[in-house]
Image: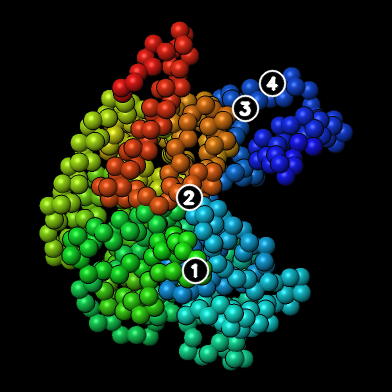
Amino acid sequence: MPQSAEKVLDHATLFHEPEYQELFKRKRETFECPASAESVEAQREYTKTWGYREKNLAREAAVINPAKACQPLGAVFAAAGFEKTMSFVHGSQGCVAYYRSHLSRHFKEPASAVSSSMTEDAAVFGGLNNMIDGLANTYSLYDPKMIAVSTTCMAEVIGDDLKSFIGNAKAKGSVPEDFHVPHAHTPAFVGSHVDGYDNMIKGVLEHFWDGKERSAGTSINIIPGFDGFCVGNNRELKRILDVMGVKYTLIQDASDQFDTPSDGHFRMYSGGTTLADTEAALNAKATLSLQAWCTRKTLDYIGDKGQETASFHYPLGVAATDELLVKVSELAGVEIPESLTLERGRLVDAMADSQAYLHGKKYAIFGDPDFVYAMARFIMETGGEPTHCLATNGTKAWAEEMETLLASSPFGKGAKVWAGKDLWALRSLMMTEPVDFVIGSSYGKYLERDTGAPLIRLTFPIFDRHHHHRFPLMGYQGGLQLLRTILDKVFDKLDRDSEIPAKTDISFDLTR
């Protein structure tokens, strides 16, 4: 074998060695009963046709590579944004391993969460004993200030009642009676991670606010939503609000939790919205959500408490940032400072500088509903065409919002909205109506391989590239980062298309 202590190969090169290639060949011949190369190629070509596309889009009984995750993942992420909070998922260990690995692979940071370790007996008799023991262990081993409880499929199917289970666990002495244990039911077989995020944020606020009298103040609450770029975005958002001189509370701030330093000291908990600030947020003048589709139940609850609410769609680019700053200015009674106006002008200038390379480019965009809306809006600001806009967790109401947005610009005239469709459907769309680029998560790399449209990674999860999440996309400064990211991919494609000497290098230019 080629692998040895003196010659350590990465798996990407190791499996190309002759010994492994021979193993793969024998496995195919012995166990896989492969079809002929000709029939495989014929089927591959058929999947590129309009006839296959119609069958694919009509598919109802199967979902293939959905662009979403399940509710508990959103709940675990939500819990990570509060001070010294341990996420406790009532369900099996395997489920929790998935949530932790998904977050840690994206952020390249440890993602702490514990499980009640339900197994077959708990599925039959209920998971109360698992809750009693699990809360006791979590409290004694990990020293949290709050334990946020959510559920998986198993607990929901058998009907475990979190409120009564937590009450029984406290009565048994698992945690003190006054210890903070908010909860949210997050069945993984309905909705998606954005619903799990919404349910957990609402559960935390209910825990601190229910039964309390509200005394209206002047502060503003801001809920970021489920955001894989929270490290960069939250810090940029706080910088903008500080520049404006606004009094605010960022509810669910996971920026420090997923960006701890390497200094010899392990931090199981870092940063997060303090529990005192979370409780005091009841008295805010208003609450703004940066992602409307992430916070529908939460905003309804906050509105019922007497606060003014407003929501946005992941503010990217010029117009969306304008709207956010104008609303903050109006609520806080402050002027938008000249320094931010200058930042806006610089973004507009940068977009104008690069307009010739962006105008008319066609894009397929996939991801969460708010992200797809925001990205389509920004693409149209650059003169691009968001040809396919797909959200597996998008609803009919989201599709109507998208269609209104696309109708507002001539660049959205030929665009189509695909709510509830998956990435295998998007492959058919891109095969039959090609685009120049695809924007989404790392899962789009298979679309890039099959269709040839370069992938621009701009949303969660990003597994196969590092550190994107550390830089903001929101605000005017974030808009510059977003613009540069797209342009780099445009120029890379221009270079690849003109790099063969004496054949395609007519415009292999040094200056673009």
Residue placed farthest to the right in the image? 30
- Residue 77, above or below 460: below
In the picture, the quarter occupied by the N terminus is: top right
**Residue identified by numbered label 3:** 47
Q: Amino acid at mark 3?
A: Thr
* Image quadrant in which the C terminus is located: top left
Q: Is residue 48 visible?
A: yes
Label 4 neighbour load within 10 Å: few <14, some 14-19, many 20+:
few
The first of marks 3 and 1 along the sequence is 3
Task: Identify the residue at image location x=42%, y=74%.
Answer: 83
Separation of disc 2 and disc 4 at Cα? 34 Å
User: Mark 1 sits on what residue?
Assistant: 265
Task: Report x, y in % for residue 431.
Answer: 53, 26
Please tell me which of labels 2 and 3 falls first in the chain.
Answer: 3
Residue 20 x/y as whole percent = 77, 34
Q: Give me the disc on residue 42.
A: 4
Marks 4 and 3: in contact by CB < 8 Å? no
